[in-house]
């Protein structure tokens, strides 16, 4: 049993200060206002749920598309050092064999993690592509973009033993609506992205079961007052959670605030969209077979197109606060909103019975001081 007392705890919906948090067998046993004479004193610190990254391609040299279970486990460990306690590794568009290997690897990595992981919990895989619009490919490799193919997808599904949580696709492609209906029936999240969808096409996809927007604003038509498009359709639909890469590079701060105000904190998920070059020095790397140059921490293809990010979730929270979002709202967008968006009721929230996955931050600079996963201290 672990007792932590004196901190300001964000559940994140409520703020309790000073609070006493009791952890037993990896779960939150109780959370009460007031101090306890026993336990460790965390006075002057913030406690918040561990971060949940819904969209990350890699970090510190570990690539989620590698097809190597060991690399996924290493990725889980390095992400935990940035406060991530659960995440969904994302592939990039690639050849069939590469995606098949990545799908197999995810099932093996999840099995290897078991009940007490030593890194962020791997929740399942996101397939970002290959069923996307080549006109909005962003940094996805055009050689391997194709139309939705349910039979091919089922091969991935079987290889992953059902551990595919999300697929990003363009709903205007032939066969996409039927694909969305089928994928939704499997319990998967269908996310609209790398798309040229009009407002009407996006609304039809949402009616068919899509519930997420992949890095809203990026790799889709901009918000226009006479051509509202996929951005407006996602922002106004209460069942859609919008991902935002909050690195202050992918989206300008006024648009970040605009999207957040329209969707609200519970429908906005901070994501990193980080790539394997994240956490490494500036220089040349590859992503899905394409050359990427990282300059001042920003990865781009040779043609200048942004190629993911080097963002971390703790930095995303600091960035949100830096552009005027209240801390409670930033923490909701980094924990509860993404946990709910992937149907994980015991993650992203600190209440009796939930997983004891949380971070300790200093209240001034919001620097990460500690990370706990299942009640075990990892940092
Ligand atoms: Zn991505």
Image (cartoon, rainbow, N blue to C red):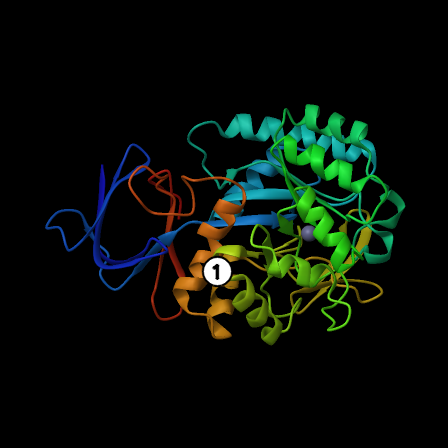
How far from the left and from the top, in percent, is residue 214? 67, 53
Is residue 252 depicted above or below 293 in this figure? below
Residue at left offset 42%, top offset 49%: 50
How far from the left and from the top, in percent, is residue 375? 33, 40
Ligand 1 is within 8 Å of the C-beta of the residue at disc 1: no
How far from the left and from the top, in percent, is residue 243? 60, 56
Residue 353 appearing in the image: yes
- Name the quarter where the N terminus is drawn: top left
Badge count: 1
Residue 285 appearing in the image: no
Q: Is residue 225 left or right of residue 188?
A: right
Residue at left offset 70%, top offset 36%: 181
Q: Which residue is mark 1?
A: 265
* Furthest residue toward right: 143
Is residue 32 depicted above or below 163 in this figure? below
Residue at left offset 70%, top offset 25%: 159
Q: Is residue 41 left or right of residue 218?
A: left
Report which quarter residue 229 is drawn in: bottom right
Residue at left offset 82%, top offset 47%: 289
Task: Tell me the crowding category of disc 1: few under 14, some 14 to 19, or many 20 or more residues within 10 angstroms, Cα based.
Answer: many
Q: Secondary structure at mark 1?
A: helix
Between residues 28 and 121, which one lies in front from this camera angle?
A: 28
Between residues 141 and 132, which one lies in front from this camera angle?
A: 132
Between residues 59 and 4, which one lies in front from this camera angle?
A: 4
How far from the left and from the top, in percent, is residue 355? 37, 39
Between residues 264 and 311, which one lies in front from this camera angle?
A: 264
């Amino acid at each position: 049993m672990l007792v932590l007392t004196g901190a300001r705890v964000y559940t994140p919906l409520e703020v309790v200060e000073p609070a006493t948090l009791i952890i037993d067998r990896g779960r939150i046993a109780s959370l009460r206002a007031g101090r306890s004479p026993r336990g460790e004193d965390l006075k002057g610190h913030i406690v918040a749920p561990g971060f949940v990254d819904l969209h990350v391609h890699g970090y510190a040299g570990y690539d989620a598309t590698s097809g190597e279970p060991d690399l996924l486990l290493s990725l889980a460990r390095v992400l935990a050092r940035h406060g991530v306690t659960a995440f969904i590794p994302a592939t990039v568009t690639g050849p069939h064999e590469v995606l098949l290997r990545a799908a197999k690897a995810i099932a093996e990595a999840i099995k290897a993690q078991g009940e007490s992981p030593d890194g962020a919990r791997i929740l399942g895989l996101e397939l970002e592509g290959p069923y996307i619009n080549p006109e909005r490919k962003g940094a996805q490799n055009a050689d391997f973009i194709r139309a939705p193919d349910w039979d091919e997808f089922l091969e991935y599904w079987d290889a992953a033993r059902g551990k595919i949580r999300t697929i990003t696709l363009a709903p205007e492609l032939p066969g996409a609506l039927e694909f969305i209906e089928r994928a939704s029936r499997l319990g998967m999240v269908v996310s609209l992205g790398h798309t040229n969808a009009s407002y009407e096409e996006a609304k039809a996809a949402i009616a068919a079961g899509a519930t997420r927007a992949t890095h809203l604003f990026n790799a889709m038509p901009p918000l226009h007052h006479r051509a509202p498009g996929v951005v407006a359709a996602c922002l106004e639909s209460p069942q859609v959670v919008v991902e935002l890469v909050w690195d202050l590079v992918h989206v300008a701060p006024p648009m970040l605030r605009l999207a957040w105000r329209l969707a609200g904190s519970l429908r906005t998920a901070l994501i990193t969209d980080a790539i394997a070059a994240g956490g490494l020095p500036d220089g040349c790397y590859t992503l899905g077979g394409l050359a990427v140059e990282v300059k001042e921490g920003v990865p781009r293809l040779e043609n200048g197109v942004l190629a993911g990010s080097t963002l971390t979730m703790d930095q995303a929270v600091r960035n949100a606060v830096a552009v005027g979002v209240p801390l409670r709202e930033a923490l909701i967008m980094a924990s509860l909103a993404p946990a709910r968006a992937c149907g994980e009721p015991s993650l992203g929230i600190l209440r009796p019975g939930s997983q004891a996955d949380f971070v300790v931050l200093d209240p001034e600079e919001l620097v990460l001081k500690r990370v706990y996963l299942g009640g075990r201290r990892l940092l």
